[in-house]
Amino acid sequence: TAPKKCIGTNTVDCMRSGAVFGTAAMIDGLIDRMEQELGEKCKVVATGGLAGSIVSCCTHEIVCDDDLLLKGLWYLYEKNK
């Protein structure tokens, strides 16, 4: 889960805060650069078990789909039956 505050009061909270907020800032920064390079807004989809914890700390609009890989595999399975 995302920390309640950016500035922690002990080692564990500081490490957790750095990992979560640092990753969220990195994602936001990459989106900013891509949108600047492309000259338009990007649709961003986050996947994976911890994606929701990180996406909730991002400033950009990001769709979170924990099951995207499974949906894609199911689609391929159904298509190739």
Image: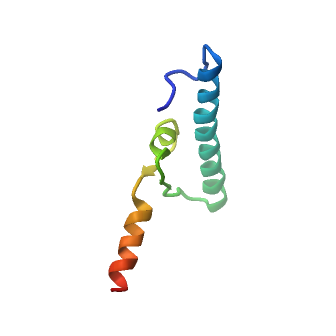
Residue 73 drawn at (x, y percent):
41, 71
Q: As displayed, is residue 79 above or below residue 18?
A: below
- Does 71 sit above or below residue 7? below
Rendering colour mode: rainbow
Residue 76 lies in quadrant: bottom left
Q: Position of residue 1 (x, y in %)?
A: 47, 32
Q: Position of residue 12 (x, y in %)?
A: 61, 22
Pick whichever, 68 or 12, lies toward us: 12
Residue at x-position 49% and y-position 46%: 51
Q: Residue furthest top?
A: 9
Q: Is residue 16 above or below residue 25?
A: above
Left/right placement of residue 28 relative to residue 43 reads right
Q: Quadrant of the C terminus?
A: bottom left
Whole-percent x, y for residue 71 in the image:
37, 66
Q: Between residues 50 and 29, which one lies in front from this camera angle?
A: 50
| Residue at 67% from the left image edge and 59% from the top image edge | 37
Label count reads 0
8 left or right of 53 in image: right
Q: Residue at x 54, y 21 (%)?
A: 5
